[in-house]
Image (tube, rainbow, N blue to C red):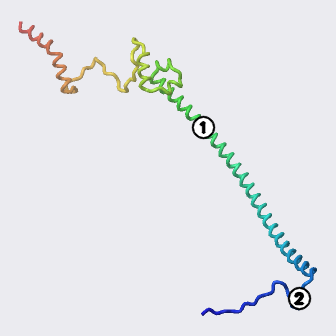
Amino acid sequence: MTDQMSVDTAPATPDTGSQDAVPTAEQVEAEYKARLSGKDKAHAAETKALREQLAALQSAQQSAVAQVDGTTSEAEALKRQLADMQKQIQQREQEYTATLRATQYPYAAEALDPQVLASMDEARLAGLNARLEPAGRPVIGIDSSTPARTASAPKTIEDMTLDEVRDALKRAAPAFEAEIRQENY
């Protein structure tokens, strides 16, 4: 069922001409040296190629390490710069908050350090400001943009609302009653 093929086998040692002749020690040694020199040459070529590859990989690794070191130092410089900028921004925010709170709570600002003023709770600042505010000082407010009404020009009845007319009549009622009583007597 299976096809069998004959396999030609080559002798392990070259045929020296006669099958009965035994090779001499010099022949065996020469043959061995020839095989070894061929293996040595192949091994030397292979070793040389491997050493060249190793040197190329080492130089590539050194350049990559140098590049990574450059990138790392650049990244560290950028991190330091970022940290410095964040500190500056935080200081500016604290200064702004302290200035704003000093405007809102002037009496508390006089008593507190600017850093404490910037970090303190608004409710506590308001309470402290109220306690420190002198009793006799008037409250400073913001003037409205509309002009104040003058008392010299009273509103006419047409300009008054219903509630204003009722209030005016209640205020004038006693004087009107007194006038009517005087006329009747």
Secondary structure of residue under mark 2: loop
Q: Nearer the viewer, residue 138 or 71?
A: 71
Q: Position of residue 44 (x, y in %)?
A: 84, 69
Relative to 87, 70 lies left or right: right
Viewport quadrant of the C terminus: top left
Q: Position of residue 123 (x, y in %)?
A: 41, 25
Mark 1, Cα crowd under 10 Å, few <14 / some 14-19 / many 20+, is few
In the image, residue 90 sits, relative to residue 22, either above or below, namely: above
Secondary structure of residue under mark 1: helix
Q: Which residue is mark 1?
A: 85
Residue type (three-letter) at the residue carrying disc 1: Met
User: In the rendered structure, which disc, 2 or 1, sits on the residue that comes first in sequence?
Assistant: 2
Instruction: Point out the frontmost of discs 2 and 1.
Output: 2
Q: Position of residue 151 (x, y in %)?
A: 28, 17
Labelled disc at residue 103: none
Q: Which residue is mark 2?
A: 16
In the image, residue 36 sits, relative to residue 137, either above or below, namely: below
Q: Nearer the viewer, residue 13 or 164?
A: 13
Residue type (three-letter) at the residue carrying disc 2: Thr
Relative to 129, 65 lies left or right: right
For the point 53% across and 24% down, the residue is 114
